[in-house]
């Protein structure tokens, strides 16, 4: 579900996305009262000009055309608008998005989450927000600063952990990341913590080195907790658009991503990337970042995300 105060607040937070991609869909329908031969082509152009991605756009258009033919669509714009909304919603239906809190409660604790993502996507900030979010849910957490490649990452994580009032395990810069993870899990077990968040380096330009590092961290953590990590969360910057697709491709090629956190969604017009990523990779988006404050991390729900941008049918001219 979404963790939002009200619909007006959520709409305001995603204003740029709503006024670009989805508003173009709406304006396309508002300009027409009847279907003509070029209308489907215009829909396709709008989808392609967004950051949904070519494959997902083709799938939406193909399914839309099949439904028009099968259901003997009557030619009313209002009906086509609803069909388009349903087809976009359908991309989310088969993606299993289990409640993280429930998984934490059901698993023998501590529940270990390894955070991955390239430098600059807001990974360290997101760890602080996630720690605060879960602490507000009643869980006891500890954070491991295993991104030892950047001194700034350790310092920044320390600030966020202090703000969230969550303990942090750290070592010096260039320390062995696996050693930091090991110490963190040992501390978590001894203190009977519920959740462990492990930060990792984001040097994707050195894929082989990063792959080996993440594999080593996982192996070492299993010496302390056999099932660790229970969850691998990939942090992506929504404002990078199609580049976010490339990051997902690279990470899933060498690590099993279980969920995604999409950051900076409030400041971008590229929210269509949400649809493409979930469709193409079948990895659930667990949370979205919609601000700089520590409380600006919200749970994601695909249907409500789509509903927030599609106007009610009666507002479309018939």
Image (cartoon, rainbow, N blue to C red):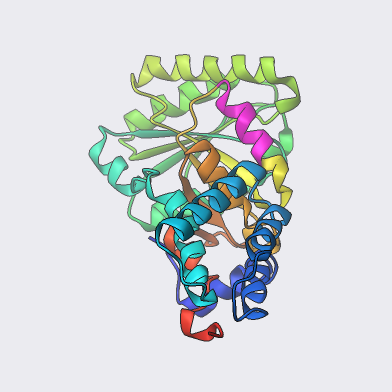
Q: Quadrant of residue 28?
A: bottom right
Compared across the picture, whether 75 is left or right of 32 comes to left
Q: Quadrant of residue 113?
A: top left
Q: Position of residue 118 (x, y in %)?
A: 68, 35
Q: Quadrant of residue 179?
A: top right
Span colored in magenta: 245-254
Residue at position x 55%, y 38% from top? 234
Is residue 154 visible from the viewing direction of this image? no
Compared across the picture, whether 162 is left or right of 89 comes to right
Taking depth in this image into account, of 213 and 310 the one nearest to the observer is 310
Q: Reply above or below: 307 against 298.
A: below
Q: Reply above or below: 30 against 158.
A: below
Q: Reply above or below: 159 against 142.
A: below
Image quadrant holding the N terminus, namely bottom left
Residue at position x 40%, y 53% from top? 135
As for residue 251 lying within the magenta part, the answer is yes
Taking depth in this image into account, of 298 and 256 the one nearest to the observer is 256
Q: Position of residue 180 (x, y in %)?
A: 54, 24
Q: Position of residue 213 (x, y in %)?
A: 60, 17
As for residue 74 lying within the magenta part, the answer is no
Q: Position of residue 272 (x, y in %)?
A: 62, 55
Q: Reply above or below: 123 against 304.
A: above
Number of numbered discs present?
0
Compared across the picture, whether 66 is left or right of 156 comes to left
Q: Main secondary structure of the magenta part?
A: helix
Taking depth in this image into account, of 265 and 124 the one nearest to the observer is 265
Is residue 26 visible from the viewing direction of this image? yes
């Amino acid at each position: 579900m979404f963790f939002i105060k009200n619909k007006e607040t959520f709409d305001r937070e995603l204003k740029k996305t709503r006024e670009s991609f989805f508003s173009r869909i709406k304006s396309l329908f508002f300009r027409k009262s009847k279907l003509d031969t070029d209308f489907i082509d215009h829909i396709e152009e709008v989808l392609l000009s967004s950051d949904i991605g070519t494959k997902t756009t083709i799938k939406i258009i193909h399914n839309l055309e099949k439904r028009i033919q099968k259901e003997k669509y009557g030619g009313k714009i209002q009906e086509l608008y609803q069909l388009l909304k349903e087809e976009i919603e359908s991309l989310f239906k088969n993606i299993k998005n289990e409640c993280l809190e429930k998984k934490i409660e059901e698993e023998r604790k501590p529940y270990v989450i390894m955070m991955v993502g390239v430098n600059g996507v807001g990974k360290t900030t997101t760890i602080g927000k996630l720690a605060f979010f879960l602490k507000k849910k009643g869980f006891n957490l500890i954070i491991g600063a295993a991104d030892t490649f950047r001194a700034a990452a350790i310092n920044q994580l320390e600030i966020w952990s202090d703000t969230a009032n969550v303990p942090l395990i750290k070592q010096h810069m260039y320390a062995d990341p696996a050693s930091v993870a090991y110490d963190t899990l040992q501390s978590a077990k001894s203190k009977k913590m519920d959740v462990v968040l492990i930060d990792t380096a984001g040097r994707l330009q050195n894929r082989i080195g990063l792959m080996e590092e993440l594999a080593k961290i996982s192996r070492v953590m299993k010496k302390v907790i056999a099932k660790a990590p229970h969850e691998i969360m990939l942090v992506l910057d929504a404002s990078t658009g199609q580049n976010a697709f490339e990051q997902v491709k690279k990470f899933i090629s060498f690590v099993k991503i279980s969920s995604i956190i999409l950051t900076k969604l409030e400041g971008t017009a590229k929210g269509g990337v949400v649809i493409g990523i979930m469709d193409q990779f079948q990895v659930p988006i667990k949370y979205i970042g919609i601000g700089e404050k520590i409380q600006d991390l919200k749970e994601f729900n695909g249907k409500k995300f789509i509903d927030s941008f599609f106007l009610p049918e009666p507002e479309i001219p018939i």
